[in-house]
Amino acid sequence: MLARIEARAADHALAILGGFAAEPGDGLPEGTGSLILLGPREPGFWGYMTAQPEWRDGLPDPMDRWSARTITALAAEFGATALFPFGGPPWWPFYAWALRTGRAFASPVRLIVHDEAGLFFSCRGALALRERLQPVAGISPCARCASQPCLSACPVGALGAEGYDVPACHAFLDRPEGAPCLEHGCAVRRACPRSQAHARMEAQSAYHMRQFHR
Ligand code: SF4
Ligand code: SF4
């Protein structure tokens, strides 16, 4: 079944980011046997996304609207319930769920780091399945990252070992010196070697920065 989900998700430029068999305390809907997280499949996600009707209609939040349509349709195919990290309430505990997959980890800067996407981890939604599936876990890229460049990459120290000072980040982005972050993506996320190995396009990072700093 996992292989079928992977194949159908790939038809929509999505990949399985990880999953886990449900346990008490996971905060999942009643009757859930397992949860599968879905996110951008690289390379190719941004080209696919920007050809979708939600991107072209000029209305707000195209990526969330596309995610809702696509993942709801995928859920229907597999008799699952679609859950999203946006549009709440309810506000589902996606951070905790990502860690439960064993493929996403708390990085030294506290952002989630994923075994494939690095600090470009982006979850577009999840399938709550009745079946009890257990996808394979991964290894944290931080275990093999001696220099930990994420800790010192922010030019104003807004994101580091102490966590994320969001007002300081916004203040920097308002200045001309903040242009590289807006145009190419957060320097901390880009500094991670695992992120660099993930074929995410800068245009996608710039979109997310515009969403964050609007
Ligand atoms: S830069 Fe290194 S330590 Fe920091 S999140 Fe990436 S892999 Fe982990
Ligand atoms: S976007 Fe730029 S200023 Fe904000 S946390 Fe990332 S590196 Fe720092």
Image: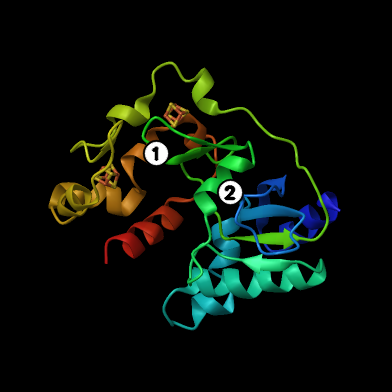
Q: Residue at x 51, y 62 (%)?
A: 85
| Residue 200 in sight from this viewpoint | no
Residue type at the position of mark 1: Arg
Q: Which residue is label 1 attached to?
A: 190
Rendered image quadrant of residue 209? bottom left
Vertical placement of residue 13 versus 151, above or below: below
| 3D distance between C-alphas at marks 1 and 2 | 24 Å
On the question of residue 190 being in view, the answer is: yes
Judged left or right of residue 30, residue 144 is left
Mark 2 = which residue? Answer: 97
Identity of the residue drawn at 54% across and 27% down: 141
**Mark 1 and 2 residues: CB-CB less than 8 Å, in contact?**
no
The single residue placed furthest to the front in the displayed view is: 24
The answer to whether the residue bearing label 2 lies less than 8 angstroms from the nearest atom of ligand 1 is no
The x and y percentages for residue 91 are: 49, 64
Question: Would residue 151 be found to the left or right of residue 91 on screen?
Answer: left
Callout 1 secondary element: helix
Amino acid found under the numbered disc labelled 2? Trp
Q: Quadrant of ligand 2?
A: top left
Q: Position of residue 178 (x, y in %)?
A: 20, 49
Secondary element under disc 2, as helix, strand or loop, is helix
